[in-house]
Image (tube, rainbow, N blue to C red):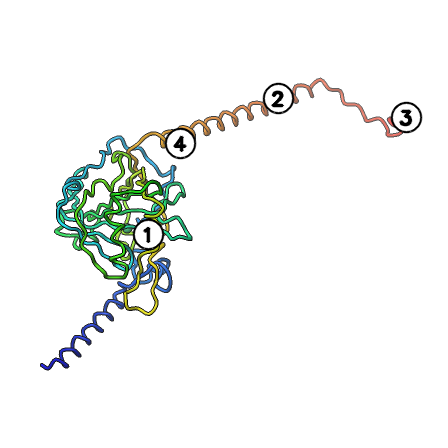
Amino acid sequence: MTRRCLAILLQCLHVIALTSAASDGSKWSYTGLEGKYDWPKKHPYCGGVSQSPIDIRNELLQYDPTLRPVEVRGYSNCTEPLTLINNGHSVKMSLPSTMYISSLPHRYSAAQLHLHWGSTDHLGGSEHTINGKQYPAEMHVVHFNSDKYSNLSTAVDKADGLAVLGVFIDVGAFNPVFDHILSHLGSVRYRDQVVQIPAFNIFNLLPERLDEFYRYDGSLTTPPCYPSVLWTVFRNPVRISQEQLLSLQTVLYSTYVNEPISLKMNQNYRHPQEINERHVVVSFRDGVILAITLAAVLGAVLIVALIVFMLIKKRSKKNNQENNKGVIYKPAASKEEDASKV
Ligand SMILES: [Zn+2]
């Protein structure tokens, strides 16, 4: 086969690959023709039940004293270089499966972590919200059930396949740990660009309190939106500086390096989904218990007020009936007579 024939064959294969990628609906974005509101057209699960993210509201919360604090293993002693990639939707860092969550009924081994954020015009960028509050960004550490499945691809569509740790990111002081990722964004500016970064202590990316979290059954927040995720969203955010957030909002593009029009990668979050019959269990009491107590006290006050009102009304009716018993009705005096007394 000549070199020219081989080139034509490769070209044909490339076109077939692109066509099949488009026809199987793998192409999607947050805005535009394939935007998040149109995901269900090509990805039916995105219009289905148990979707994520959600707005975590007080009335959904159920305190569960049996919830164990999140425990992870292998997060602190990662020694191999890590791969950072711009996948066109987010910046993703591969994680070794020697990292895992040990506090769930199955072992969930790490696969990757990635971020969601807003833009310079729209500060909110987290996917989950707390009583409507959106944080500037959110990190997702994705794990798969390695007791039952051999890798992430096999586990991704199984009901007990994935466990994701969600971490809110707020603005505060410069965060040297997050800079292990953020300082390399310039090397993965365009889609499909990849860079190897030195290993660092991944554990330090997590918030301090691993015992305070919200947990619920949900889904991938991107197509194909499989309802396969046990979500653990930590209550307390981590903080990065305003400059670090700005680099996240401005450095990356969702387009390839040679595309004529470059699109900034920002506002890569999905809006909160219907909660339906779901509940969110929480590992902490304060705040939740206060809200429930307040609601109970208010309810009790309302009921007492209603009972008192009914009793007063009943008594006043009875008094009126008793007073009326001794009254002798006389015909009314004529208007002329009344007028003469004025
Ligand atoms: Zn995510």
Residue type, mark 2 in image: Lys
Q: Quadrant of the C terminus?
A: top right
Q: Amino acid at mark 3?
A: Ser
Residue at x 89% of width, y 26% of height? 337
Residue type at tag 1:
Ser
- The residue lying toward the viewer, choosing from 45 and 3, is 3
Label 1 and label 3: CA atoms lie apart by 92 Å
Q: Nearer the viewer, residue 168 or 132?
A: 168
Real-space CA distance between mark 1 and mark 4, rounded to the nearest whole angstrom: 38 Å
Q: Earlier in the sequence, mark 3 or mark 4?
A: 4
Q: Residue at x 19, y 42 (%)?
A: 201
Q: Secondary structure at mark 2?
A: helix
Residue beneath disc 1 = 247
Mark 1–mark 3 CB contact (< 8 Å):
no
CA gap, disc 4 and disc 2: 41 Å
Query: Between tags 1 and 2, which lies in front?
Result: 1
User: Which of these two is toward me, 74 or 282?
Assistant: 74
Mark 2, residue position = 318
Tell me: is circle 1 under 8 Å from ligand 1.
no
Query: Residue 52, relative to residue 89: is it above or below?
Result: above
Amino acid marked by disc 4: Ala
Res 340 label: 3
Circle 4 packing at 10 Å, graded few (<14), some (14-19), many (20+), is some
